[in-house]
C-alpha cells in the first residue's frame, strides 16, 4: 500500500513540472514587455533600461529563466503585486480560505443531494421519481452557473428579499445573529455551485448503482434473507460508490475553479474574484500565482482520486 | 399420379410467390445505417423536440436580423429600461436598445463560437486518437502522456490567463472582433480535445484487430486507406455524439468568458455579455436577465438532448 501511494506521488511530480512549463511557456510566448512602462518614461535612457533588463535576468536564455521562475513558485514566493506592491502571498492568504469554504460547502451539499436521489432513482428505475430526477439532473447541468446565479438573485433577493446578493467578510454582528448572517449570505453562492455539481454527480451515482444492483453478490445478499434496505445500502451502494469516489475527487478542482464565476456573481472575496480583478488591472504576478495554485490543486486532487481508488477497491493491484 | 402433379403445381406456386416477395423486397429502398439511426432518433421524443428548438434558434439567428430590422445598437434614452411590449418583445436595456435584436445578433456569435470550437476540438482529438490507436507503441505512449497532461490542466484559469496575455496582440493583428474570435475558438478547442482522443483511440485499438481490417490489409489497402476508409466510419458514431455535446460545452464556456468581461468587446452583444450588462439593472429590468439566460439555457439543453438521442440512435447495441 505504502509503495502504491509513493508511486502515485512520484508520477504526479512530472505532471506538475509539465504544467508549470505550460504556464511559463504561455507567459514567455506572450507579447508585451514587463518594462514597457519604463519605455514610455523619457527620463529613463535606453541604456539604463537595458541594464535593468539584464539585472532582472530578462536577457537570460529561456531554460534559465524557467528554472528561476519555477524554483521561486514552488517555494511559494510569488513576488509582489504590481498594483498594491504587497507580496502576492499576503494577498492570497486572505482569499484562499473564503474560496475553499464556499467550494467545500458546495461540494458537501452536492453529495448530500446527489447520493440519495441517485440511489433512489436507480432502485426505482423507470418510475415516476426516476423520470423526474433524471430530467431535473439533465436540466441542471444544462444550466450554467451564471444563469442560475442571476435567476436566484432575481428570485430570492429582489422578489422575495430573503437573502443578500452580496457576500461580505466584514460582518461583525455578535453572537448567533452574526453566525446566521454568515450562513445566510453563503446560501446562494453555495447552492448555485452545489446544484450544478449535484446534477452531474447524481447521474454518475445512478449509473454506477444500476450496474452494481444486478451483480451476483447483491442477489446473494438478498437470497440469504437480508432486509432490502440493508442489501441496498451495505452491499450495492458500497460497491457502487467506488467509481463515484474517483469522479467526485476529479471534479473537486472543477468546483474550485468554477467558483471563479460564482464569486464574480455574488462578489465573494475569494481567489476567483481576485483573479478577475487582477486581470482587469494587468497585475501579472497575481494572475500567474493564482493560475499556478489552481494547477497545484488539480494535480493534488487527481492524486487523491488515484490513492482513494486504490484504498477502496482491493481488486486494484498495488504494483 | 394425381398426387405428384399436385405437389408440382404447389411447389411451382410457392416459387412464384417467393419470387414475387423477393422483387417486392428489392424494389423497396434498402435500409441504410443512417436511416436506421434516424428511425431510432425519432423515437426519442425529447431529442426530436431538442432538434426542432435548436433548428429554430439557428434559423432565428441567421434570418432573424434580416426580418427583425430594429437596430441592435440604436441608443434611445426615451425608451430605456422598458419592459416587454409589441415594439420590443424582450424589452429594452439601460440605453434603450432592443434586447430582442441584440439576442438575435449575439446568437450568431455564440453559436459560431460553439460550432467552430467544436470543430477544432473534434479534429484535433480524432487525429491524435486515430494515430495513437492505429500505430501503437512509442507513438501511442507519447501521445497518451500528452493527453493526460492536457487533462490535468486547470481549464478555466488557463483560459483566462491566455486571453489576458494574448488578447491585445491578436486584436492588433486581426482586428478587435476576429482576433478575439480566433483566440477563444482556438483555446476552447485546445482545452477540450482530450476525451475525443481517448474515445477514438480506444475504438481504433479494438477495431484494428478485426477481420475486416485484416481483409483490407490482405487485398493490399494502404495504411491511410485502412485508417480513413475502413476504420474511421466505424468510429464516426461516438465522435458525432461527442461533437454535439462539445458544441453545448463551448457555448457555455464562451458565455462564461463574456460574462466575466473577458470575451468579445462590449459592443458585440453575445449572450454572456448581455447577462453581464444586466447585473446592475436587475432590480429595475429583470427581463434583461431572464431572456438571455433563457436563450442560453434553451440552446444548451436542446443540444444536450440531441446528443443524448444521437447516442441512443447511433449505438447499434441499443436498437430494439
Image: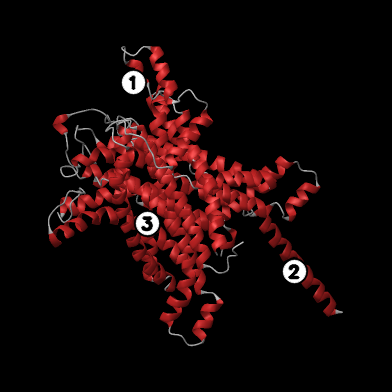
Q: Residues within 10 Å of mark 3 (few under 14, many from 20)?
A: many
Above or below, comparing residue A257 to residue A202 in the picture: above
Residue at 32% across / 43% down in the picture? A92
Which residue bears the numbered disc 3?
A197
- The answer to whether A60 appears left or right of A134 in the picture is right
Query: Which comes sooner in the sequence, label 3 or label 1?
Result: 1
- The answer to whether A52 appears left or right of A43 in the picture is right
Task: Decide which of A267, B308 is in the foreground and name it.
Answer: A267
Mark 3 falls within which chain?
A
Task: Decide which of B205, B35 is in the foreground and name it.
Answer: B205
Between label 3 and label 1, give the one nearer the viewer: 1
Q: CA distance from mark 3 to mark 1?
A: 44 Å
Which residue bears the numbered disc 1?
A37
**Residue B260 in sight here:** no
Residue at 40% across / 29% down in the picture? B167
Where does residue B21 sit, x and y in percent of width and height? 69, 62
**Residue B310 in sight here:** yes
Where does residue B310 sit, x and y in percent of width and height? 51, 53
Provide the secondary structure element on which disc 3 rests.
Answer: helix
Mark 1 falls within which chain?
A
Mark 2 falls within which chain?
B
Provide the secondary structure element on which disc 1 rests.
Answer: helix
Where does residue B284 sit, x and y in percent of width and height? 15, 42
Q: CA distance from mark 2 to mark 3?
A: 64 Å
Task: Decide which of B197, B30 is in the foreground and name it.
Answer: B197
Task: Decide which of A273, B136 is in the foreground and name it.
Answer: A273
Residue at 57% across / 51% down in the picture? B237
Which residue bears the numbered disc 2?
B14
Amino acid at each position: 500500500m505504502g509503495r502504491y501511494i509513493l508511486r502515485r506521488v512520484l508520477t504526479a511530480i512530472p505532471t506538475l513540472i509539465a504544467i508549470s512549463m505550460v504556464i511559463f511557456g504561455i507567459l514567455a510566448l506572450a507579447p508585451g514587455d514587463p518594462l514597457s512602462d519604463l519605455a514610455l518614461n523619457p527620463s529613463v535612457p535606453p541604456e539604463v533600461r537595458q541594464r535593468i533588463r539584464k539585472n532582472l535576468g530578462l536577457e537570460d536564455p529561456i531554460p534559465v529563466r524557467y528554472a528561476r521562475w519555477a524554483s521561486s513558485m514552488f517555494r511559494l514566493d510569488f513576488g509582489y503585486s504590481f498594483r498594491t506592491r504587497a507580496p502576492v502571498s499576503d494577498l492570497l492568504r486572505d482569499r484562499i480560505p473564503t474560496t475553499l469554504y464556499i467550494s467545500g460547502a458546495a461540494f458537501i451539499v452536492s453529495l448530500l443531494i446527489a447520493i440519495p436521489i441517485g440511489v433512489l432513482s436507480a432502485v426505482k428505475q423507470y418510475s415516476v421519481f426516476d423520470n423526474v430526477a433524471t430530467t431535473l439532473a439533465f436540466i441542471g447541468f444544462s444550466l450554467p452557473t451564471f444563469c442560475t446565479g442571476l435567476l436566484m438573485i432575481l428570485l430570492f433577493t429582489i422578489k422575495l428579499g430573503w437573502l443578500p446578493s452580496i457576500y461580505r467578510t466584514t460582518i461583525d454582528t455578535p453572537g448567533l445573529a452574526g453566525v446566521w448572517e454568515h450562513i445566510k449570505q453563503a446560501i446562494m453562492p453555495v447552492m448555485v455551485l452545489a446544484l450544478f455539481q449535484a446534477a452531474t454527480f447524481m447521474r454518475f451515482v445512478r449509473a454506477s448503482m444500476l450496474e452494481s444492483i444486478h451483480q451476483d453478490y447483491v442477489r446473494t445478499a438478498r437470497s440469504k434473507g437480508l432486509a432490502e434496505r440493508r442489501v441496498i445500502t451495505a452491499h450495492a451502494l458500497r460497491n457502487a460508490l467506488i467509481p463515484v469516489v474517483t469522479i467526485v475527487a476529479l471534479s473537486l478542482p472543477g468546483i474550485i475553479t468554477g467558483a471563479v464565476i460564482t464569486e464574480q456573481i455574488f462578489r465573494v472575496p475569494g481567489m476567483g474574484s481576485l483573479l478577475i480583478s487582477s486581470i482587469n488591472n494587468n497585475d501579472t504576478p497575481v494572475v500567474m500565482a493564482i493560475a499556478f495554485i489552481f494547477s497545484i490543486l488539480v494535480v493534488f486532487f487527481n492524486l487523491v482520486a488515484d490513492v482513494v481508488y486504490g484504498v477502496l477497491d482491493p481488486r486494484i493491484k498495488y504494483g | 399420379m394425381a398426387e405428384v402433379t399436385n405437389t408440382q403445381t404447389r411447389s411451382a406456386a410457392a416459387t412464384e410467390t417467393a419470387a414475387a416477395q423477393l422483387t417486392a423486397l428489392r424494389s423497396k429502398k434498402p435500409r441504410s445505417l443512417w436511416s436506421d439511426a434516424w428511425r431510432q432518433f425519432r423515437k426519442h421524443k425529447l431529442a426530436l423536440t431538442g432538434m426542432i428548438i435548436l433548428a429554430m434558434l439557428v434559423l432565428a439567428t441567421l434570418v432573424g436580423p434580416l426580418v427583425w430590422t430594429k437596430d441592435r445598437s440604436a441608443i434611445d434614452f426615451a425608451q430605456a429600461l422598458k419592459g416587454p411590449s409589441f415594439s420590443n418583445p424582450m424589452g429594452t436595456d439601460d440605453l434603450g436598445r432592443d434586447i430582442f435584436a441584440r439576442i438575435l445578433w449575439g446568437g450568431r456569435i455564440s453559436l459560431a463560437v460553439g460550432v467552430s470550437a467544436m470543430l477544432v476540438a473534434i479534429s484535433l482529438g480524432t487525429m491524435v486518437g486515430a494515430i495513437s490507436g492505429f500505430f501503437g507503441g512509442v507513438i501511442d505512449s507519447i501521445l497518451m502522456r500528452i493527453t493526460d497532461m492536457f487533462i490535468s490542466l486547470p481549464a478555466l484559469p488557463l483560459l483566462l490567463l491566455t486571453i489576458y496575455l494574448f488578447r491585445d496582440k491578436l486584436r492588433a493583428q486581426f482586428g478587435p472582433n476576429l482576433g478575439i474570435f480566433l483566440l477563444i475558438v482556438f483555446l476552447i478547442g485546445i482545452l477540450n480535445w482530450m476525451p475525443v482522443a481517448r474515445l477514438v483511440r480506444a475504438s481504433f485499438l479494438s477495431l484494428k484487430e478485426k477481420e475486416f481490417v485484416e481483409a483490407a490489409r490482405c487485398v493490399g489497402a494502404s495504411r491511410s486507406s485502412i485508417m480513413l476508409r475502413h476504420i474511421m466510419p466505424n468510429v464516426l458514431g461516438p465522435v458525432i455524439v461527442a461533437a454535439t455535446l462539445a458544441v453545448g460545452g463551448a457555448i457555455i464556456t464562451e458565455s462564461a468568458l463574456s460574462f466575466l468581461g473577458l470575451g468579445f468587446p462590449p459592443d458585440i452583444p453575445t449572450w454572456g455579455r448581455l447577462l453581464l450588462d444586466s447585473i446592475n439593472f436587475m432590480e429595475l429590468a429583470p427581463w434583461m436577465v431572464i431572456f438571455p439566460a433563457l436563450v442560453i439555457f434553451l440552446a444548451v439543453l436542446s443540444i444536450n438532448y440531441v446528443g443524448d438521442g444521437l447516442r441512443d440512435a447511433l449505438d447499434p447495441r441499443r436498437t430494439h
